[in-house]
Image (spheres, coloured by chain):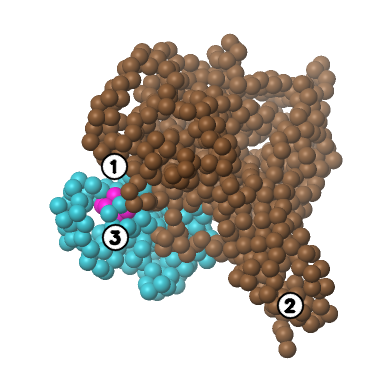
Chain colours: A brown, B cyan
Amino acid sequence: MTTKERVADRIGESTTRPDGVAKLTGNFAYGSDLWMDGMLFGATVRSPYAHARLLKLDITPAVLMSGVRAVLTQDDVPGVPGFGQVEQDQPVLCDGTARYWGEPVAIVAADDAETARAAVAAIVVEWEPLTPVTDMDAASAVGEVFRDMVIRRGDADAAGSVVIEAEYETAIQDQAPLGPEAGLAIPDGDGGLDLYVTSQWVHIDHAQIIASLDLEPDDVRCHPVGIGGAFGAREDISLHIHVAMLALRTGRPVRMVYDRTESFAGHVKRHPARMRYRHEADDDGRLVKVTVDLVLDGGAYAHTSAAVLANAAFFTVGPYNCDNVFVDASVSRTNNPPAGAMRGFGAVQVCFAYESQMDLLAKELGIHPLEVRRRNALAPGDPMATSGQIVEGSLPTLRVMQELETIPMPDASIPDDPSLLPGGTGLTTRKQDVVRGVGYALGLKNLAFSEAFDDFSEVRLVLTPAGLEIHTAAIEVGQGLVTICQQIARSVLGIERIAWVPADTSQIGSAGSTSASRQTQMTGGAVYEAAVGLRTQILERYDGDELTNDGVYRAGELVASLAEITGEQWVRYRHPPTEEPDEFGQGNPHAGFVVAAHRAVVDVDPELGLVRVVQVDTVQDVGKALNPQAIVGQLEGGIAQGVGFAIMEELILKDGVILNPTFTDYLIPTLLDVPDVRSRVIEEPAHWGPFGAKGIGESPTISSTPAVVAAIRAATGKPLTRVPVRPQDIVGV
Amino acid sequence: MIVTLTLNGEERSATVAGWESLLTVLRDNLALPGSKNACEQGECGSCSVILDGENVNSCLVMIGDCEAAAITTVEGIAVEGELHPIQEAILEEGGVQCGFCTPGFVVTAAHLFAGDPRPNEAAIREAFSGNICRCTGYGALLRAFDALAEDGS
């Protein structure tokens, strides 16, 4: 007799992570844990100025040091002198002018880390400091931009009876992943090498690395390694080319690991923004026209600025209808730290502005903040206010608001426990001075890559007697991609034993970046499609009608046991095609949308400018909940970053120099700072992707920030047009 | 100099200069990379270890001061291949994402619950105020610790 047992850990279940035990016992290998006997240690000389001419670079003292094996400069770059995903405009090492603080100038490999550091200190560098361009508006005004674009939709003469006009600013947020940038390069003795570097997308790294090293694609293999968080910080090249150059020059394995300050200098940041908004509405609060002038600061080099700008411009109105939209947008080239991807990718900055505008509109009309949002809510079948693209698939804008209102509010009284007052255990606040406020915000985000980018993910499923293997170059950064893909494969194939096999760039094609909320849908979609193909293939082979963990059944009889079945299925999965918008930003640039709502409750001491975020509730459009616990993890984690951006996270610059590049001075929410979070999901299937699931990695970070600021405004009556909100913004000094 | 430690219950020694951090020696000399190097400034708690009964940031402890010390690292929390109940609870609640902070949370939790098997929520929040997690928003970790405190064993 055979029993067909249903294999657990399918989609919809809160499966525990396969890497959990290794991570809990200290046995999981991260990039910074890589070690090879006989390896050399790399280190980097950096510019102390944001803008300076290199007058002298004398490496001789370092070269002469015992234990130093190589000292390299820009002259040693064998191939394309620059790198960058879009434009290769950042020199591998300083090309004679430093254009941002911390720009790499020379690199060293030595027998041990201390000698490498000493060699860095021994190199003689003389600079002529130049005046840094640090104002994004000034740069934009003289045409120093990576991209500018306009959106022209509807009637420029349209006018509303209610006009809301304000200017908003967002500062620089850092992804601050806990794992530092790290890499190990191992020469293969044949002119090529194997590279293990912390990355979100090994194939885009590979293309840039081989170009700068002047090697053939087969010469360099980029391998996925254990990642200690990413949030966008690892989408662009950091030390990849440097460590590879040192390994090729010395013929020995070389490891580089950034310390925290180098990490702050060494990866791109969230773009700071200035946004001038004018909303015009009719007497009922329906939007008539939105006019926006938007400038982002891209910093010194291009990276993904062009795509970030497009996102900011296309999401400039949010999840609302409006027939007349006029946007002028540009991303400046300055001597500030290079900006690029961070969770939310341009949609974060504008969300703060448009949600602040919606609140002002509600206030002007004397209606509830959610009511003005209801009256304008974007729904499937509606045109996007900016591009005019018709919203396809699901978009439960109204439902996320409706559900949000059903989540219980916290106890209305200000707590007696002094440690729960603003300022916390500092005990500086008196209970009678504390004012409570409640704020709301909605956020809209595109799913996966946009603007005609050929976005795909490759997966190869291999069924062996030991179980199923998922071969992919998709990067797990902690979000739970491995778990989700295993659940998808289990659900389709009914097979219990599923192994994740990280593939290097020589073994499989690109999985695309672990960014843009895309991997659940893209690599998950590839796994789904490959699993369906594999199941069909196997059932046909045995003329069966069901595949389970036992094997193939035909009319209830087991005809082939799983241990004897082998098979392979390769898939390159693509989402529905997107288009390049026209010169007025019109067209179909996006593959789909995801919406979320947040409600924040804060306690504020208006005299001291201190804030305690009491509770943040959220309702998230998820399409289909593949792993409820993993979703909660994204929602709570994203809210913590959103709260951080609302009240504490900011890189402070002076003349382009980061003044607080440490965890002592760049404040990240701790367990004492985070609010209670109550979350709900709305399941309305997406029009593509596995089981109708949507990517939700970014949404929680987008609208949580404006919700918190709205709550502080409600408590204080202050305009608060900038994030993060600082004590002086509340106190008004 | 040679420093001798009782490390996760085992006597170990290492040849060191003396000025290195305990974290560096654990990771580079003693092949115990579980303690993590996120900030090396005593801010994030990823390198937490128990040193003679105290929960410390191993990045701020000089190895020269550790002679004859008893040290427990994250590698020493699980017993004979079985997850410690603290590790079990964090896993079950989904308190691991990227995992870089996890060793620090495990060690700090082991220290907290060894001293007080039933801490209240305020005590838990305070105990972990030196441990930064960038992924989870702490919700799952707090639920895990609340459950352990309720259980009290």
Instruction: Judge the density around disc 1: few (<14), some (14-19), many (≥20) Cα neighbours within 10 Å.
Output: some
Element class at badge 2: strand
Residue A150 in picture, x, y percent from top left: 72, 21
In which quadrant is the C terminus of chain A drawn? Answer: top left
Would you place residue A427 above or below residue B110 in this image? above
Given contact means CB atoms under 8 Å apart, are the residues at marks 1 and 3 in contact?
Answer: no
Residue sitting at 60 percent across and 18 percent down? A145
In which quadrant is the N terminus of chain A drawn? Answer: bottom right
Magenta highlight on residue B1: no
Find residue A24 and report its image quarter. bottom left
Would you place residue A558 above or below residue A10 in this image? below
* Chain ID, mark 2: A
User: Label 3: which residue?
Assistant: B50
Q: Nearer the viewer, residue A708 or B130?
A: B130
Q: Which mark is residue A111?
A: 1
Find the magenta span and give its range: B22-27
Residue A158 in picture, x, y percent from top left: 82, 19
Find residue A364 and report its image quarter. top right
Q: Is residue A418 left or right of residue A476?
A: left
Q: Nearer the viewer, residue A570 or A689?
A: A570
Residue type at numbered disc 1? Asp
User: Label 2: which residue?
Assistant: A560
Magenta-colored segment: predominant secondary structure = helix
Q: Is residue A4 left or right of residue A93?
A: right
* Chain ID, mark 3: B
Q: Nearer the viewer, residue A532 or A444?
A: A532
Instruction: Judge the density around disc 3: few (<14), some (14-19), many (≥20) Cα neighbours within 10 Å.
Output: many
Distance (Cα) linking label 3 and label 2: 54 Å
Instruction: Judge the density around disc 2: few (<14), some (14-19), many (≥20) Cα neighbours within 10 Å.
Output: some
Magenta highlight on residue B24: yes
Q: Nearer the viewer, residue A392 or A632?
A: A392
